[in-house]
């Protein structure tokens, strides 16, 4: 099993839960034992398997067929702008990607709860990239979330000048953490 499979499996589980919502807790009264209600998750799985030759995800991709398109739709918007009623920071794929990659709870909390300035989300190569920083402390405390919309693989850069003025911490989809020169811009 490759190193990035485990974070992708966690992402797939989060997506399945998000897709099922409250309906997953109850089966219809007339459903046979062991049957789950058929919903968007089942349709997405069937579509993924059926669409293996399409431009969408392959059978090994944990993402529903439209997930990448939805993330790419954020390009040119700010993280607080909504696409289909959901802001970037509230999107299930973004949350799951951060949770799967960032193992440091303090860093994860900062990235997901601190508010501050942000640049427009953009496509950099094949990744959808957001950048944000702490209000009134932007140069010293910033982060970037980079997601491959085809696979859900998420790399996160976190820079805290007080901890290390010369290097940023990178939490990679492979499960590795490394330090790189500079901040997250």
Image (cartoon, helix red, strand yellow):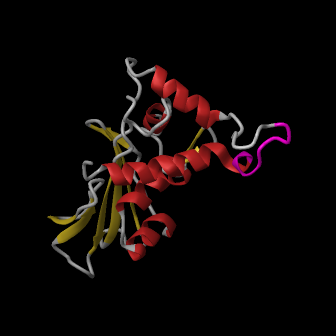
Q: Could you say where residue 22 lies in the image, as x and y percent from the top left?
A: 72, 50
Residue 130 in view, yes or no: no
Residue 119 in view, yes or no: yes
Label the magenta part by its dominant secondary structure.
Answer: loop
Q: Residue at x 36, y 39 (%)?
A: 151
**Which image quadrant: the C terminus?**
bottom left
| Nearer to the camera, 167 or 116 | 167
Q: How many marks?
A: 0
| Nearer to the camera, 131 or 47 | 47
Q: Could you say where residue 92 lies in the image, as x and y percent from the top left?
A: 53, 49
Query: Residue 111: which quarter of the image?
Result: bottom left
Q: Could you say where residue 167 lies in the image, as x and y percent from the top left?
A: 18, 70
Q: Find the residue positioned furthest to the top.
A: 53
Chain part drawn in magenta:
23-30
Query: Residue 133: which quarter of the image?
Result: bottom left
Classify residue 26 as left or right of residue 20: right
Q: Is residue 70 above or below residue 34?
A: above
Q: Could you say where residue 3 lies in the image, as x and y percent from the top left?
A: 25, 53
Q: Find the residue positioned furthest to the right.
A: 29
Q: Find the residue positioned furthest to the front.
A: 33
User: Is 165 inside the magenta-drawn segment?
Assistant: no
Classify residue 163 as left or right of residue 55: left
Q: Residue at x 44, y 71 (%)?
A: 110
Q: Residue at x 48, y 50 (%)?
A: 79
């Amino acid at each position: 099993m490759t190193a990035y499979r485990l974070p992708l499996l966690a992402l797939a589980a989060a997506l399945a839960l998000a897709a099922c919502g409250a309906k997953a807790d109850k089966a219809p009264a007339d459903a046979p034992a062991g049957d789950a209600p058929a919903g968007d998750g089942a349709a997405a799985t069937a579509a993924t398997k059926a669409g293996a030759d399409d431009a969408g995800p392959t059978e090994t991709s944990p993402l529903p067929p439209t997930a990448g398109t939805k993330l790419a739709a954020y390009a040119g918007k700010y993280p607080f702008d909504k696409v289909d009623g959901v802001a970037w920071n509230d999107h299930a794929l973004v949350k799951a990607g951060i949770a799967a990659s960032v193992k440091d709870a303090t860093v994860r909390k900062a990235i997901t709860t601190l508010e501050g300035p942000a640049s427009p989300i953009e496509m950099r190569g094949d990744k959808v990239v957001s950048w944000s920083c702490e209000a009134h402390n932007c140069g010293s405390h910033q982060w970037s979330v980079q997601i491959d919309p085809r696979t859900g693989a998420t790399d996160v850069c976190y820079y805290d000048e007080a901890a290390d003025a010369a290097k940023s911490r990178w939490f990679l989809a492979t499960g590795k953490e490394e330090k790189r020169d500079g901040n997250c811009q």
